[in-house]
Amino acid sequence: MTTRPTRRLALAATLVGAVALVLQFVLTWQWVQRQGFGVGRALWIYLGYFTILTNALATFSLAQLAAGRSNGPLARSEDLTAITTCLVMVGLVYHLVLRQTWHPTGWARVADELLHAVMPLLYLATWWSARHAGSLSRPRLLAWVAYPVGYLAYGLARGAVDGRYPYPFLDVPALGWPRVLANAATVGLASLGVGAALAGLAYRRAAPGRLSGRAGPR
């Protein structure tokens, strides 16, 4: 059962996630309008980013927790750990690789910080607060790996269709396939490492007694 403090934190994070997602779509729509395109083009570009898709999954998951549905879709213990892994990677990749590639101002900067910094931290805090959040089993971890792998195929396919790659490290024409695949492998291995670390933390939090081979004091 989700505790009241966790539900309150999840509700606050849900609202932040919803605001960030809506704000980013509005900004994208305004940008494509200036280029003479409509809402369809804005939606196409908007849904091309791993950041947007992952924040949308996280916001839905948080809404489940806020409603007290700890067994709801994307709110089960292993799903919380997996989504936390994905959002942590969103923040890490952005701050270590992408931040220096552009310098947003105004509302664009607000949306940028909410999606890449605030939401990963809020979700991480909610995950830690949710005491029912257990470790991520190997089968579940591998199943969740299918999500970023699937996104990789999706992003590359989109780039092949319209020549617009969502991230510079996936730009095949500019980097070539060997470099792009190496970049993807690096991100994938880092994701597995982060997931394993979070799973270990969840295990320690859920059952510290098992670390010493005992269920508790005797």
Image (cartoon, grey):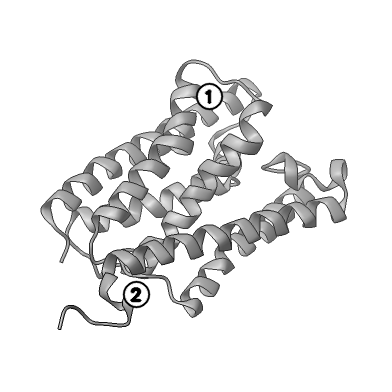
Say which of marks 2 and 1 sits in front.
Answer: 2
Residue 211 numbered tag: 2
Q: Amino acid at mark 2?
A: Leu
Q: Nearer the viewer, residue 186 or 208?
A: 208
- For the point 33% across and 66% down, the residue is 204
39 to the left or right of 207: right
Residue 17 numbered tag: none
- Give the crowd class for mark 1: few <14, some 14-19, many >=20 residues within 10 Å: some
104 to the left or right of 200: right
In the image, residue 118 lies at what x, y percent?
Answer: 39, 36
Q: Quadrant of the C terminus?
A: bottom left
- Give the crowd class for mark 2: few <14, some 14-19, many >=20 residues within 10 Å: few
Q: Is residue 144 above or below residue 167?
A: below
- Residue ID for mark 1: 30
60 to the left or right of 143: left
Regarding residue 194, the answer to whether it shows in the image is yes
Q: Is residue 47 above or below residue 117?
A: below
In the image, residue 108 lies at what x, y percent?
Answer: 50, 23
| Extreme residue toward the front, this view | 218
Q: Is residue 137 above or below residue 62?
A: below
- For the point 50% across and 77% down, the residue is 138
In the image, residue 178 lies at what x, y percent?
Answer: 86, 55
Q: Nearer the viewer, residue 27 or 41?
A: 27
120 to the left or right of 207: right
Q: Is residue 110 above or below residue 197?
A: above
Local SS, label 2:
helix
In the image, residue 208 lies at what x, y percent?
Answer: 28, 70
Q: Amino acid at mark 1?
A: Gln
Nearest to N terminus: mark 2 or mark 1: 1
